[in-house]
Image (cartoon, helix red, strand yellow):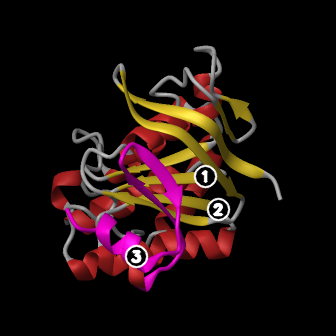
């Protein structure tokens, strides 16, 4: 079983400061993983290290077969094309409709065939239940709909790994549940590995997965319910 994400004795940085020492983490194809912990414990810094936004200076890291320490700038886009990222604050292009947001991503990642672009956008909009919303501007959509567009954007290039940083943080409980159904479905039906940073205890209980807890400058996998409960207490 090949690891899509592997860290060995890796120090995770936030700026110039180490926020997690000696991270050991292995995540395989098809895994559904949570990274949890109180604010400021390094959860998002792990995501930023996986995407090569944060440098890895101590220890070993590997994502989708690409080594992180000493990664060259020209290799970073190659890595990121293997990833799909879902943000809490959506980060959609507000001056373009849903369709144009998705087309922009495809063209910027090398798609040129117009018919292929149309087919792929139609497919992902159907996957996320937004076939009737292609012409809408982001401000005309609800928060849940905007997050579905973000997931559509994340899966356009059929990534090996989806990283979702607080994907339900700005959503009500019912809408959050719909987003989790979508991410869980992608994981089960496509075999796509999913890593979710979350504070939402409810979704974690309804959609169980492996759990890594960040605390005291460490991040370790656990099945201890008491430790997990503490991690969800802000």
Q: Is residue 137 above or below residue 96?
A: below
Distance between the alpha carbons at the discs numbered 1 and 2: 6 Å
Q: Farthest residue toward the left?
A: 139
Q: Earlier in the sequence, mark 3 or mark 2?
A: 2
| Residue at the image position 41 percent from the left and 74 percent from the top | 180
Q: Position of residue 75 (x, y in %)?
A: 65, 21
User: Mark number for residue 127?
Assistant: none
Marks 1 and 2 in Cβ contact (< 8 Å): yes
Quadrant in which the C terminus is drawn: bottom left
**Between 15 and 181, which is closer to the camera in this rendering?**
15
Distance between the alpha carbons at the discs numbered 1 and 3: 19 Å
Q: Mark 1 = which residue?
A: 161
Q: Secondary structure at mark 3?
A: helix
Marks 1 and 3 in Cβ contact (< 8 Å): no
The answer to if 191 sits in the magenta stretch is: no
User: Mark number for residue 192?
Assistant: 2
User: Mark number for residue 204?
Assistant: 3
Q: Nearer the viewer, mark 1 or mark 3?
A: 3
Q: Is residue 123 above or below residue 226?
A: above
Residues packed near mark 1 inside 10 Å, few (<14), some (14 to 19) or many (20 plus): many
Residues packed near mark 2 inside 10 Å, few (<14), some (14 to 19) or many (20 plus): many
**Between 140 and 54, which is closer to the camera in this rendering?**
54
Residues in magenta, as a range: 206-234
Quarter occupied by residue 181:
bottom left
Q: Is residue 91 above or below residue 86?
A: above
The answer to if 209 sits in the magenta stretch is: yes
Q: Is residue 27 visible?
A: yes
**Between 56 and 104, which is closer to the camera in this rendering?**
56
Q: Earlier in the sequence, mark 1 or mark 3?
A: 1
């Amino acid at each position: 079983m090949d690891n899509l994400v592997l860290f060995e004795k890796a120090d995770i940085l936030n700026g110039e400061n180490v926020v997690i020492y000696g991270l050991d983490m292995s995540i395989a194809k098809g895994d559904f993983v949570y990274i949890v912990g109180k604010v400021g414990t390094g959860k998002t810094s792990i995501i930023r290290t996986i995407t090569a936004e944060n440098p890895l200076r101590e220890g070993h890291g590997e994502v989708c077969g690409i080594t992180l320490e000493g990664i060259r700038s020209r290799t970073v886009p190659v890595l990121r094309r293997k990833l799909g990222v879902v943000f809490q604050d959506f980060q959609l292009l507000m001056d373009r409709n849903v369709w144009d947001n998705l087309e922009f991503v495809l063209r910027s990642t090398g798609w040129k065939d117009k018919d292929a672009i149309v087919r792929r956008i139609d497919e992902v909009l159907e996957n996320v239940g937004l076939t009737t919303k292609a012409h809408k501007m982001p401000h005309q959509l609800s928060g849940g709909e905007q997050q579905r567009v973000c997931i559509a954007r994340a899966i356009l290039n059929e990534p090996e790994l989806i990283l979702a940083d607080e994907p339900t943080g700005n959503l009500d409980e019912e809408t959050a549940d719909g987003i989790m159904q979508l991410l869980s479905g992608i994981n089960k039906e496509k075999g796509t590995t999913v890593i979710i940073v979350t504070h939402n205890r409810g979704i974690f209980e309804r959609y169980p997965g492996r759990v890594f807890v960040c605390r005291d400058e460490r991040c370790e996998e656990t099945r201890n319910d008491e430790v997990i409960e503490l991690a969800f207490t802000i």
